[in-house]
Image: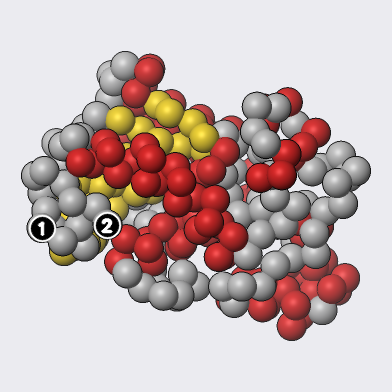
Amino acid sequence: MIRPSRSGQLLLMRHGTSRANVEGWTAGWSDVGLVPEGEADARRAARILAAADLRPDVVHTSMLTRARRTAELVVEALDLPADAVHATWRLNERHAGAFEGATREELQAAYGRARVRAWRRTPEARPVPLAGGDPRHPVHDPRYRGVDPGLLPSGESAQDVLGRLLPYWEGHVVPDLLAGRRVLVVTHEHVLRVLVAHVRGVPSPQTGEVPGRVPWLFELDPATGRVERAAPLADPEGTTL
């Protein structure tokens, strides 16, 4: 439970538009970059934060380029120190196992609509896992060389995402909030679903609206740590993403 020393301010947003978003395939832990529209998304988010006078003190993001680059662009546009950004594999997108790299139509043709639908909507459902020898498995990625191989996923359910997210959330993000810092988390769609459900105390992460590419502000009750209010920030240019 978060118990901030002042009214907590938590900002959450999704990374900018990536190549996988444009082309319509499942990225998971695949390391795809932002398209030009995605870089514009990040700069727009920075303008929204500046207009609301909500410059973050610290930014937490994933190890995947699409999220990390988004965070770096926001920090650059707001003229924040580069060391304000902290990247961790625990904020990476939900690992899609053997589903990575395929469109929804390709997945349904290969594995059946029911299995794909269950993975997207059922908290405990996992995708077809990657074999350890598959070159796409994160044990072969040098960025994760310092991580215990037994912790690296081969395919995750929403519950699995919560399990690997919580140690970082409780060990790094919560202490920042307790210290009175304004925290921005730049991460991925499925991680945001799990995280928002957690801070709201909702049992299922598969339902409800979650932050997109416009940052959301979560106001936390200093007495209980529960979310009092959560809403997207107003865009002075009138754009919603």
Q: Quadrant of the C terminus?
A: bottom left
Q: Quadrant of the N terminus?
A: bottom left
Q: Amino acid at mark 1?
A: Ala
Residue pictured at 52% horizontal, 35% vertical = 88
Quarter of the rendering containing residue 138 = top right
Residue hosting label 1: 223
Q: CA distance from mark 2 to mark 1?
A: 10 Å
Work out whether 221 lies above or below 33: below
Residue pictured at 23% horizontal, 41% vertical = 177
Nearer to me, 105 or 224: 224
* SS at badge 1: loop
Q: Amino acid at mark 2?
A: Met
Q: Would you call the spot at circle 2 few (<14 residues within 10 Å), some (14-19), or many (20 or more)?
A: few
Place of residue 47 in the rendered image (x, y in percent of width and height, measured from the top left): 27, 35
Place of residue 36 in the rendered image (x, y in percent of width and height, measured from the top left): 54, 34
Residue hosting label 2: 1
Q: Would you call the spot at circle 1 few (<14 residues within 10 Å), some (14-19), or many (20 or more)?
A: few
Nearer to me, 45 or 169: 169
Residue pictured at 50% horizontal, 58% vertical = 162
Residue found at the far right of this picture: 133
Quarter of the rendering containing residue 110 = bottom right
Residue found at the far bottom of this picture: 114
Nearer to me, 121 or 40: 121
Left or right of residue 139: residue 18:
left
Residue pictured at 80% horizontal, 74% vertical = 108
Left or right of residue 171: residue 15:
right
> Does residue 77 appear anywhere in the picture?
no
